[in-house]
Amino acid sequence: MDNIEVEIRNNLYEFYDRVAQICGIYSERQDHWSVIKNIPKVWPRIIYRINTEIIEQKSSIIFAEKVKSDSYPELLISEDENIQQIDPFLRMLGFCPFSAWKGMALNNMGEIVSPQLPETIQIVRCESSDDIEQWMQIVTSELITPVQFDKVLLESLIDQSGVEVYLLKYNGVGVSTILVFNSGTSTGLYFIATKKLAQRQGFAKLLVQQILSQNARKSKMPVILHATKTGEALYSKLGFLPFNQFFLYRYLNADL
Amino acid sequence: MNRQQIFAKIEAIAKKIFGDGTIVTEETTSADIEKWDSMNHVILIATIEKEFVVTFDIMEIIGITKFGDFVDLIEKKQNQCK
């Protein structure tokens, strides 16, 4: 897995590009950053693909004006994009870091063991309106609050090749979620979440194991994900290794 | 300013952001307070930085999980200034 850090970064950026493109929401790729501007209170509204050129005089003025006029609430930057240099500039503009993700990749696809599912558990590809609704509710409450996932966006994603959305059900009720994005050079796992009352019971682990085992039969591409601090230990147990870190910022004056 | 005084100030800030009825101890984490989402997290950081006239660096901010972490950081910064 050469340049896995780049792959971990690019899969995420391509996923954002894809989201913007298929949903017809406003997006823009500038020389030194990309943005998605969605409607207020709806994921995603984000600035990403930032590089150090952004702090050079001409770019920094354009960027500052853009941020001020459009009020983007969220920004993502990778540590390998010279975060230490860019951070003071972002803080000065009114952004504040609030979370970090660890870019992780699966080291050995051969080690994936997928336990047999008990009768009480089903893993379904989200297609019905009810499954989509349950998936959205879990992702919204556990991962992206105070913004929410848009139903039209999710339905559009589900119709795309390279995107698969799954829901793990316990006794017929959705408890865990995942979205799989195939960029062509890697498989990215996104929106891995479990309903609060069902957490710490192994549902997310089971769901990821099943997806990995299914993926291993179809592809030899690396599997990557971006883990929160709490998720890191689980993914390490599944064989994922940590690589680069990503930082999330919020714009303090943003109109959510 | 001693640890208790630092915590008292942080407690007042937290109650202003999350509501008067919020239970705030050094061990209280974001998971204990429903209103502690990403937006309120950055408001909390910015308010504490302003109140104590300090700046947390990115790695310090990412490491914050409970109110006691703020107290630790402010104590550390006070000691660095002595």
Image: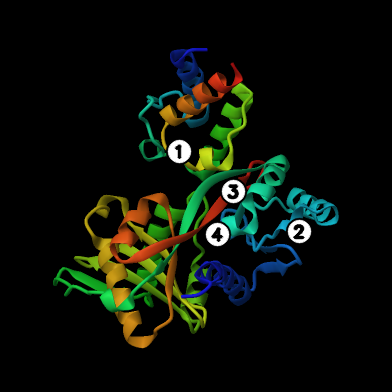
Residue under numbered circle 1: B35
Residue under numbered circle 4: A43
Which-is-in-front pick, marks 3 and 1?
3
The chain identifier of the residue carrying mark 2 reads: A
**Residue A96 located left or right of residue B6:** right
Residue under numbered circle 3: A249
* Disc 2 from disc 1: Cα separation: 37 Å
Q: Foreground: B14 or A100?
A: A100
- Type of colouring: rainbow
Q: Are marks 2 and 1 in contact (CB under 8 Å)?
A: no
The chain identifier of the residue carrying mark 4 reads: A
Of the image marks 3 and 2, the number of the one nearer the N terminus: 2
Outermost residue on the right side: it is A58
| Residue type at the position of mark 4 | Trp
The picture places residue A21, in percent across and down from the top left corner, at: 63, 75
Which-is-in-front pick, marks 4 and 2?
2
1 and 4 marks on the same chain: no
* Disc 1 from disc 4: Cα separation: 19 Å
Image height of A156 relative to A200, above or below: below
Residue under numbered circle 2: A53
Which-is-in-front pick, marks 3 and 2?
2
Mark 4 nearby-residue class (10 Å; few <14, some 14–19, many ≥20): many
* Disc 3 from disc 1: Cα separation: 18 Å
Q: Are marks 3 and 4 in contact (CB under 8 Å)?
A: no
| Residue type at the position of mark 2 | Glu
Where, by quadrant of the figure, is residue A17 drawn? bottom right
